Image (tube, rainbow, N blue to C red):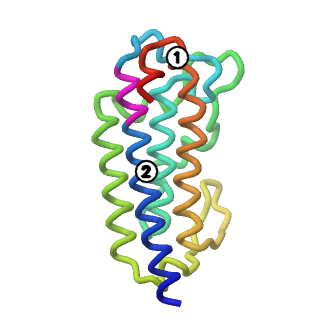
Amino acid sequence: MSVRRSALRRQLQRLFAYNHWANTKILHCMAQVKAEDDHSDSLCMRSMHGTLSHIILGSRLWFLRMTGGDVSKYNHLWKTPYAAPGDTSSPWETVFDPADLAKELQHEHDSWVGLIESLSDDELEQSFSYQDTKGNSYSSVRSDIMVHIVNHSTHHRGQISPLFLSTESYWKL
């Protein structure tokens, strides 16, 4: 059993290392894009900046849930998580200054790596209870949610990356 659990820990560490690398890669490509090209109606957060902010806050929300932190200050963002047709911006664009995204990504990465290290092998596979942004109660396995966080980031990076097709940044991905 302990070999499998140790393999789970190593896999989670690899997934979060990959997630940080990929998020940072997207951020570096975003820096090559003109400010006016940051926005697109094809993005449900209406901008690369807003989408990366959503990735960061989705991660932070789950971290706080898993560690018993206060998530209430973020709940308003999930009331209308996506821009409606015709919207030219979204609340996600107001959360972080674009200049702070690298620092926020690093903070998220460090938080998750630290948590993975601090939990025992058994704790990684235990369920924890939490409430969603509407107050509904749920229970999930910690490692399952950790994998979900990486998948969530991948999903939204996949929405951003086509915007680089017409730029030199795309070929640096």
> Which quadrant, please, contains the C terminus?
top left
First in sequence: mark 1 or mark 2? 2
Q: Is residue 106 above or below residue 7?
A: above
**What secondary structure do most residues of the magenta stretch adopt?**
helix
Q: Kindly report the distance in space between the C-alpha atoms of the residues bearing marks 1 and 2.
A: 26 Å
> Could you tell me which residue is drawn at 58 percent across and 48 percent down?
152
Horizontal arrangement in the rendering, residue 96 relative to residue 129 (left or right): left
Give the x, y percent position of residue 54: 50, 39
Compared across the picture, whether 137 is left or right of 75 comes to: right
Residues shaded magenta: 25-31
Q: Nearer the viewer, mark 1 or mark 2?
A: 2
Instruction: Say which residue appears at 40% left-offset and 24% top-offset.
Output: 30
Residue 21, placed above or below residue 11: above
Q: Label 1 amino acid?
A: His
Q: Quadrant of residue 98?
A: top left
- Magenta stretch containing residue 28, yes or no? yes
In the rendered structure, are the residues bearing label 1 and label 2 in contact, judged by CB atoms less than 8 Å apart? no
Q: Nearer the viewer, residue 121 or 141?
A: 121
User: Where in the figure is residue 77, as x and y percent of width and height?
Assistant: 54, 41
Look at the image and say whether residue 22 sits in the magenta stretch: no
In the rendering, which numbered label is found on residue 14?
none
Please state which of residues 56 and 4 is positioned toward the viewer in this rendering: 4
Residue 163 in the image, given as x and y percentages of width and height:
55, 19
Mark 2 lies on a secondary structure that is helix
Question: In the figure, residue 17 lies in which quadrant?
Answer: bottom left
Amino acid type of the residue that numbered disc 2 sits on in the rendered structure: Tyr
Residue drawn at the location 63% of the way across and 61% of the way down: 135
Crowding near the residue tagged with mark 2, few <14, some 14–19, many ≥20 C-alpha atoms within 10 Å = few
Q: Which mark is residue 39?
A: 1
Q: Secondary structure at mark 1?
A: loop
Q: Residue furthest right?
A: 85
Residue tagged by mark 2? 18
